[in-house]
Amino acid sequence: MSHRRRGRGRGAANPLAPPFNPHAIPSSPEDTRMDESIASPVQTVRSTHHETLDDEEELTLQHLAETMDQQIESYNKLLDDHNLIRTTLDALQQYLEVVQTRHIKDTSDLKDQIATLTTHIERLEEKPVTTTTTTPAPPQRPIAPLPTTTWAQKAARAASATTPTPSANKKATPLVLTKRDRTIVIERDGTALPDNTNNLTIRDAINSAIKKPLIATIEFTTNHNIRLITRNNTPATSVLKSHRPAIEEAIRATIPAATGLRKDEIWHKVIIHGIPTTSSFSTVQSEVQDFNPGTHLPRPPRWLTTEAQRSQKSASTMVLTIAGKEAADKAISSGLSLFGKKFKVQKYLTFGPDTQCSKCLAFGHHTTRCANPTHCTFCAGDHPAYLHTCGRSDCPTKGKPCLHTTLKCSNCGDNHQADSEECQTYQDAHQEATERRNRAD
C-alpha cells in the first residue's frame, strides 16, 4: 500500500487550483487574457541559485580573459627578446666571419712572405764564396776602439742640434694676427693732402719704395692720421724694422706734414697731480721715461687746466699719454717718480657734451666728478633709481617703474625718463657732441 498522502500523488487534485468547469466558455477573446488587476494565487519566486552561478561564471571568464591577456603580453615580450637576441647573435656571427676572413688573409700573406724570404736565403747560400789571397799587411799600431754611443745619447745630440740657442730663440709670430698687429700709423698735423693723393697713390708709393707689395689697405682716421694695413700674417713690427727708411722717404714725397711713423698700439691717458707750473713738457716727459722703467710717453704731456687757472698756482695737474695697459695700470697703482719724489697718478676720465651723469642725470660731466644732488631716473626724486618705489603699500615693485608711477624727467620736467631719447635736453647734448666731432675732423 502506498505511503503517499492522499491528494499529493500523481493525478491528485491540486487544492490551490480553481474548480474545473468544462462548460465555461469565454464570452469574448479578451476574456482569455489574465486580469492584471487580480493577484495570482501562485507567487513567483526568482531562482537566486542560477543568478549566482551566472555571476560566478562571468567573473571566472573575466579572470580567464585577463590571465590570457597577461600571458599574451608576456609571450610578446619574450618574442621581442628572442628576436633581439637573434639579431645580436647574427651581428656577432657576421663580425666573427669578417675577423676570421681577415685572419686567414693575414696568415696567407705571412706564409707568402716566409716563402719569399726562404727562397732568397736559399739563393744566397747557393752563391760560391770567393776567396782572395792577400799578402799579410805589415804590423800597424793598434787603434783604440771608438767609444760606443747609446740611442739615448744619439737622441739627445739630435735634439740639441735642432733646438735653437737662446740667442736664436726669438719671439714666435702668432699664427693669426689682429688688425692692430698689422697696422702702421703715419702721424700728421692736419695739413690738407694734395688733390691727387688718395688711398691708391699712397699704397703704390710705399710698396714701390720697399719693392714689395706688403701694404694692402690705406685708412684715414678722424685725427688726420693715416693707417697702413699690411697683408695677412705680415707683422707691422717686421715691416718697420726692415723698411722704415724706405717708408719714411715715400711719406716725405707723398704725404706733407707727416710728423711720425709708428706701429699702432693702445694708449692710455692718466693725470698726474702736483707738477710745478714752471716745468716744461719735454722736461716732464724725460723725467717720466728716465726714472720709471717700462713707461713710454708717445706724446708730450699737456696741462689739464688753462693758463689762466694756473697763473696763481705753484703746481697743477698734467695729462700723460702712456703706451701699454700694463704700464698705465702700474702708474695708477704705484705712482710715478720724477723730480726726486713720488707723484700720485689717476685714470683720465674722458667725457663730452653727451656724457650723462648717472648720479644727477645731467649732461656734460662724469659721475665721479659730480657734486650735484642725486635724482631718480623715473620720477626725478632725490633718491637713486634702484631705490625707486611708487609709494603704495600694496605694490611690491622696486627699482623700476610700475603702473602707478608718474614718469618725470629731472632735466626738462616732461613725462618721460631722464635717459629717454625723446628728451629735448638729451637731443641737444648729442647734437652738440656731433658738431664738436665734425669740427675736429
Image (spheres, rainbow, N blue to C red):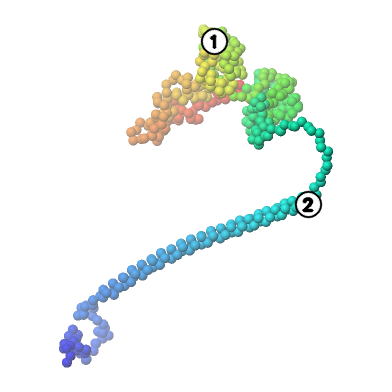
The amino acid at mark 2 is Glu
In front of the other: 11 or 67:
67
Picture residue at 51% right of the left edge, 20% below the top:
333
Residue at image coords 47%, 21%: 368
Looking at the image, which residue is at 81% across and 45% down? 131
Q: Do the residues under discs 2 and 1 have CB atoms within 8 angstroms?
A: no
Figure quadrant of residue 386: top left
Question: x and y percent of residue 133 in the render?
Answer: 83, 42
Q: Which mark is residue 126?
A: 2
Local packing at callout 1 (Cα closer than 10 Å; few below 14, some 14-19, many 20+) is few
Which disc is residue 408 wearing? none
Label 2 or label 1, whichever comes before in sequence order: 2
* Residue at which label 1 appears: 340
Which amino acid, mark 1? Gly
69 vs 281: above or below = below
Helix, strand or loop under label 2: helix
| Residue 383 visible | yes
Question: Looking at the image, is 71 positioned above or below residue 267?
Answer: below
- Image quarter where the N terminus lies is bottom left
Rendered location of residue 115, percent (x, y): 71, 54
> Quadrant of residue 173 in the image?
top right
In this rendering, the answer to whether 153 lies above or below 318 is: below
Residue 133 or 366: which is nearer the viewer? 133
Of labels 2 and 1, the one closer to you: 2
User: Which SS class for mark 1?
Assistant: loop
